[in-house]
Amino acid sequence: MSVSLFIAVMLSSSMMKSTQKVEVERARMIESIGKQFNPHVRDLPFSFRYGGHSFKELVSGWKATSQARDLGRTKDTFTYVRTDPATGLQVRWVATRYKEFPAIEWTVFLKNTGKHDTPIIEDLQALDRDFERGTGSEFLLHHNVGSPANRSDYMPLETILGPMATKHISAAGGRPTNSDMSYFNVSNGKKGTIVVVGWPGQWASDFTRDAGNRLHIKAGQELTHFKLHPGEQVRTPLIVLLDWKGDWIDGQNEWRRWMMAFGMPKPGGNLPKPMFLASSSRAYEEMIGGNEANQIMHIDRYLEEGLKLDYWWMDAGWYVQQHGWPQVGTWEVDKKRFPNGLTPISDHAHANGVKTLVWFEPERVAPDTWLSNNHPEWLLNPLGVLETRNASALGTNEPCVVFNTGENTVSWNGITWKSKSLACHPGPNGEYSVIRWKAPSDGQYNVEATFEGIDEKTTTDFHVLRGTEAMFNGYVNLNGFGRSMRNSGTIWLQAGQSIDFVVGYGNGNYGYDSTGVSAVVTDPSGTKHDAAKEYGKGNWSYGFLSPGARPDASTFKAYDKKRHGGAGGTQLLDLGNPQAWNWLVEHIDNLLKVNHIDLYRQDFNMDPLIFWRSNDAPDRQGITENKHVVGYLAYWDELRRRHPNMLIDSCASGGRRNDLETMRRAVPLWRSDYAYEPIGHQGMTYGLSMWLPYHGTGTVATSGAPYYGGGVSPVEPYAFWSNAAPSLGSGIDIREKAIDYASLRRLFGAWRKTGKFYYGDYYPLTPYSQAEDAWIAWQFNCPSSGDGIIQAFRRAKSGETSLHVALRGLDGKAKYSIQILEGGTNAVSQKASLTGSDLMHGLTIESAEKPGVVVVVYSRLLH
């Protein structure tokens, strides 16, 4: 036997014994978690109250059926059904057990099979159970920030759950990963359980420790208090539990493998490949300046520079709109800019081996669009009681006057409108918003005026004018003035003379400047004229004054436009409405086919929670959200059925909708609206890779790149690799021929070589940090092929020229070749090959540059 063959046999024998031990342990865990699959277990892992009583107290008297199905080598399912003979409520628990992973998942469905409305169903929890720990170790909750679009996106967090500790974590605003990720790892020493909530809506979870060894976890849709009509069905969030042993990072890698097997889309039967995309969004403010000619030109320029694209990306603004890309709701290609649709662009791309991606945002509906004008009955509008007046000539939503016509207070986006109250909002260019009253006769009038900030951040100036004469001037939340300012006084008015109650933008920024106005004029006869009580009547009118250092009443122009729905007028397409759902499926499907679109990108730039909840009656709380979520998932399922080879990209102002139900159907190619900045994106790769094997972002290969812009930009390897991800979108200004394309070709070529590693196991090699003086590093390791990558970043203020890292997941006795792909000094390359044991004890990486990047690729040698 040759020496090399002898070594190979010995290594194989050693690895086999180790593998057998691991597999035995995994089999035990799979068997253990499978016990929860037992249909005779009374302690079901979900709960709710029905007619004021616990379901578990009632269920013994209900009709019971169950069914088990073996789905082959990888999984089997169990359906547990209980039906109330008195009311017809059917409870169906559908669980899936995975045979190759210590994992189980389930969803609960509730349906009214009776002839009358059910009693109230409330506090519906998809997960409600205890977890026990062993002695000598404490529960530690590993969780992550969501994507609020700042430097901390996806930051890993730890919460110790000691005796009597509690922790509440939830979604925000109805988008599931707006504030926090809905993925949790509960560790207990050398073992633990991953708990994941799949719900593209407002989920909530509670972790509650007792004084002993138990941790109680509840999770579900945050608000449920409803009756079901005959034939009506709702569902709970998806719950996945996965047990692990080792350390908590081993648990994360068990999860990543499960995700790749069962939690990710596989168009055409395959996981998405690493992809290089490009767009003209930075040059043309998305697609506002895009047209057929310049899109084809951009594609050709990339090909001319030898930057081979997988997809050409056409983002927001290709459709009919008059006021910029946010005006969505007319889903037709703008024939003024694209006379032949998007088809010529797609066909040109296809002829050059490039596919096309196109952006949609069907759920948000802006004013003056086809959907808002033709199908208001399909739309949810929590601000429908708000009547807004503004000026069509200005082409903006502000300045405006808003009146709450309803009987209740309306709160939205930090603004609170009291019932039957008036408010003014200044304009973006300094226009003043005005409520005007005209005197019917000569005389002495008493004027009372209160200006109050009704936005959390209101900062405005106010004035009460008689022509050019000011009765009162002041501020709200500025220059020492308070949040609410009351003024009163008397003034002589001639018949036809006006009093103007004026609101300006105070600090020069018109954002967040909604200001409540209470205006009462008492005439000489003692009759009070209240602006709110007489809204739209009598001698009151509404308009704006031109910008200026001081308001000039002579520039008054009346508002000519009136609508319901608040200043922005945004509405939500109700995907729980069957007619709306059917229209959307057919219309979008046709656009995809006609325009030869290969990848469907769906955005969601609004928080839907208030739209859902404002539509619910007191005895139907949670219903609108539930039906919208079900409709949203069914919509994507139908698109995927009709386009089985099409990938879907999920975006929601970045990564605010990355729950498991969404990630089963899509990938997030734009993981955050916090774009390009290196340290932030290093942290995003560090944190998000724990949960999602596939994600993407953009790069300009420049540290200081603005969100929009063009021109020649320097090529910086540190910035490029800081944004490197499984999917990488280019935002460089390809029109500029002076860019260093040779360096870009080298960087993109090196990134291509690393793409396969992102589907390996993931190991953080340093603590998470945003500090300017730190190093940060991680490893992706492919155990089956024996190769992997290390990415290490020395930040700008780091005084350390080297970093010592201990690799993980290697074969201790095997030898590995080492190659520096980017940066670094000779510290690594001097040792062309090292044993796995050496590398797991530590590898020194050096960078003389700061900021600097080192990318190391390693491969297991066969002999």
Image (cartoon, rainbow, N blue to C red):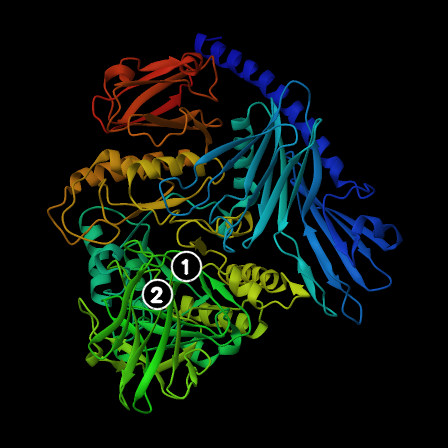
Residue nearest the viewer, comparing 54 with 403: 403
Which x, y percent locates residue 819?
Answer: 30, 23
Residue 684 image point, x, y percent: 39, 39
Q: Mark 2 points at which residue?
A: 326
Q: Can residue 499 be seen in this view?
A: yes
Q: In this view, does 246 lie to the left or right of 280?
A: right
780 vs 429, nearest the viewer: 429
> Where residue 23 appears, x then y in whole percent?
63, 25
Provide residue 607's location: percent of width, then percent of height: 47, 58
Residue that appears at 43% across and 37% down: 155
Q: Which amino acid does label 2 sit on?
A: Pro
Identify the residue shown where x is 69% and y is 66%. 619
Q: Which amino acid does label 1 sit on?
A: Asn
Residue 712 vs 24, above or below: the answer is below
Residue at label 1? 605
Q: Is mark 2 on a helix, strand or loop?
A: loop
- Verify CB contact (< 8 Å) between mark 1 and mark 2: yes
Q: Is residue 332 above or below residue 79?
A: below
Residue 509 found in image quarter: bottom left
Q: Which of marks 1 and 2 is nearer the N terminus?
A: 2
